[in-house]
Image: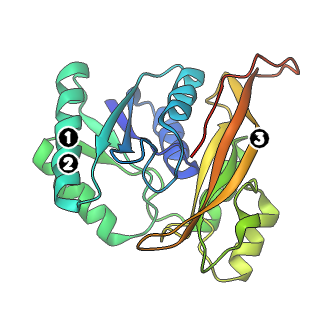
């Protein structure tokens, strides 16, 4: 089936897209939503251009749509973006990275029914710990880019997801997928990527709002070719 994938740049959307392709689906495009106010990926806090770099390394087109914080407006904007891609690519389904939140799946199923496309949920119902360990075991690498400040300190952003961190989260009774929004990640390398995004300069920043979050501001980075120690010239920098 020809599909598009809901893309946040994080581990769950990445693993879902990876598993969908393994299952034989043709991934026509990544769909990424960016805050209209901040020009960054919603919740993850990653600049739009870094998601475009991920797509470039994956060899898959990415469609980025700006959205508002209002949920009713978000649904309208979401549907408009999917309809555009459905018409352009002739897709029949959409891939999501939900793991266990019923309200998320119910929203996805309702919206996809309105759009007359099939929702594909490769991670649904799997134990959260299993999902993260499968992601790591497949060879993907991701870094924590945002987290709730009432759960984590500034040192948590910038950490890479590994088995030790998974065990640490489980011991604290925190979902290792961050399914409830405890934290978010950014994928920098893996079997879907032709190279690696290496972070050269970052800074933790505390942002206050409805919830206080630590965000990792990625100021400088570079890319390397897969399987090569040689580095390319820095691809860009950012400031918050």
* Residue at far front of view: 239
Residue 166 location, quadrant:
bottom right
Residue 117: image tag: 1
Query: Are there few (<14), some (14-19), or many (20+) residues within 10 Å of tag 1?
Result: some
Q: Are marks 3 and 2 in contact (CB under 8 Å)?
A: no
Q: Is residue 95 left or right of residue 53?
A: left
Residue 206 on image: x %, y %: 60, 65
Mark 3, other Cα within 10 Å: few <14 / some 14–19 / many ≥20: few
Q: Residue at x 82, y 19 (%)?
A: 231
Position in image of residue 235 (x %, y %): 67, 22
Residue under label 3: 201
Q: Does residue 209 appear in the picture of this structure?
A: yes
Corner quadrant of residue 7: top left
Report which residue position mark 2 lands on: 112
For this rendering, which residue is in front, 33 or 92?
A: 33
Count of numbered circles on the image: 3
* Visible residue check, residue 1: no
SS of the residue under disc 3 = strand
User: Which label sits on residue 5?
Assistant: none
The image shows residue 103 at horizontal and vertical percentages of 30, 70
N-term mark: 1 or 2: 2
Q: Secondary structure at mark 2?
A: helix
Give the SS element for disc 1: loop
Image quarter where the N terminus lies is top left
Find the distance from the CA under tag 3 to the CA under tag 1: 41 Å
Q: Earlier in the sequence, mark 3 or mark 1?
A: 1
Q: Where does the image place residue 73, in percent across and percent down from the top left? A: 17, 54
Which residue sits at x=47%, y=45%? 8
């Amino acid at each position: 089936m020809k599909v598009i994938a809901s893309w946040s740049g994080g581990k769950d959307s990445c693993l879902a897209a990876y598993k969908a392709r393994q299952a034989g689906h043709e991934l026509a495009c990544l769909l990424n939503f960016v805050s209209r106010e901040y020009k960054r990926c919603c919740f993850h806090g990653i600049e739009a251009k870094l998601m475009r770099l991920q797509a470039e390394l994956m060899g898959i087109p990415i469609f980025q749509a700006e959205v508002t914080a209002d949920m009713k407006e978000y649904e309208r904007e979401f549907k408009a973006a999917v309809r555009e891609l459905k018409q352009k690519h002739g897709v029949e389904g959409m891939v999501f990275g939900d793991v266990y939140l019923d309200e998320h799946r119910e929203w996805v199923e309702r919206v996809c029914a309105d759009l007359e496309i099939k929702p594909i949920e490769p991670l649904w119902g799997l134990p959260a710990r299993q999902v993260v360990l499968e992601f790591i075991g497949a060879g993907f690498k991701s870094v924590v880019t945002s987290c709730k400040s009432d759960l984590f300190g500034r040192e948590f952003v910038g950490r890479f997801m590994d088995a030790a961190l998974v065990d640490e989260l489980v011991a604290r009774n925190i979902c290792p997928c961050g399914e409830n929004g405890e934290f978010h990640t950014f994928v920098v390398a893996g079997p879907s990527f032709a190279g690696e995004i290496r972070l050269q300069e970052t800074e933790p920043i505390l942002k206050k709002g409805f919830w206080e979050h630590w965000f990792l501001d990625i100021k400088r980075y570079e890319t390397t070719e897969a399987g090569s120690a040689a580095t390319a010239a820095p691809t860009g920098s950012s400031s918050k």
